[in-house]
């Protein structure tokens, strides 16, 4: 493996870092109170990756097993305990645990602990996951055809065959 080709060709470097204070409000909050903070979007990283903080309450939340054809997904547990499907089984994670799912890898996550939990979600390359997160709120009002189109647009392929 070698380094990728250079994308910056200057000789002095540039002042381009971003800073997000810890108390910055989440960009999106689900009706159940789950907060999603858009730390780095695919758009803001030039498509390299997307990084999100997922903070959920004690109620069961999260997607069933699925896979993506175009993006890898990683989970880093910050607090509490999340159940992560690793393609074979549901595993119970704790703070400091990390799970990486390559492109095409089966995965899912759920908070079944009865307590709040938070984690970082990393997608590579950076896809527009913000539209997926926000669009889920209206999924129950969509027709089966609209749901199938929504999931296809956002590269979510469910193992149970749902649309």
Image (cartoon, rainbow, N blue to C red):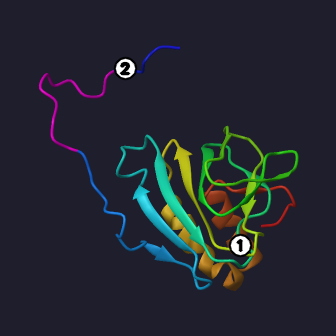
Q: Which residues are magenta?
A: 6-16
Residue 69 is inside the magenta segment: no
**SS assignment at label 1:** loop
Q: Residues within 10 Å of mark 1 (few under 14, many from 20)?
A: some
Residue 26 location, x and y as percent? 43, 72
Say which residue label 2 marks.
Answer: 5
- On the image, which quarter does residue 69 sit in? top right
| Quarter of the image where the C terminus is located | bottom right
Residue 8 is inside the magenta segment: yes
Circles 1 and 2: CB distance less than 8 Å? no
Mark 1 vs mark 2: which is more N-terminal?
2
Q: CA distance from mark 1 to mark 2?
A: 40 Å
Residue 150 location, x and y as percent? 64, 66
- Locate residue 76 relative to residue 146 in the image: left or right: left
Residue 128 can be seen in this image = no
Residue closest to the eye, 42 or 79 = 79
Q: Which residue occupies 61% across, 43% down?
A: 70
User: Which of the two marks, 1 or 2, is nearer to us in this view?
Assistant: 1
Q: Main secondary structure of the magenta part?
A: loop
Say which residue label 1 marks.
Answer: 61
Q: Which residue occupies 64% across, 73% down?
A: 116
């Amino acid at each position: 493996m070698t380094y990728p080709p250079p994308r910056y060709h200057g000789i002095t470097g540039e002042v381009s870092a971003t800073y997000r204070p810890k108390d910055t409000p989440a960009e999106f909050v689900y009706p159940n109170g789950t907060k999603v903070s858009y730390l780095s979007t695919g758009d803001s990283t030039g498509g390299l990756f997307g990084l999100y903080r997922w903070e959920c309450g004690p109620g069961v939340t999260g997607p069933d097993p699925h896979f993506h054809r175009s993006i890898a997904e990683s989970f880093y547990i910050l607090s509490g305990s999340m159940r992560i499907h690793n393609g074979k089984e549901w595993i119970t994670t704790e703070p400091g645990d990390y799970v990486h799912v390559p492109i095409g890898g089966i995965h899912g996550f759920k908070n079944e602990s009865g307590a709040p939990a938070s984690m970082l979600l990393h997608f590579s390359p950076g896809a527009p996951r913000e539209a997926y997160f926000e669009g889920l709120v209206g999924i129950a009002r969509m027709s089966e055809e609209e749901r199938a189109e929504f999931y296809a647009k956002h590269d979510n392929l469910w193992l149970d065959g749902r649309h």
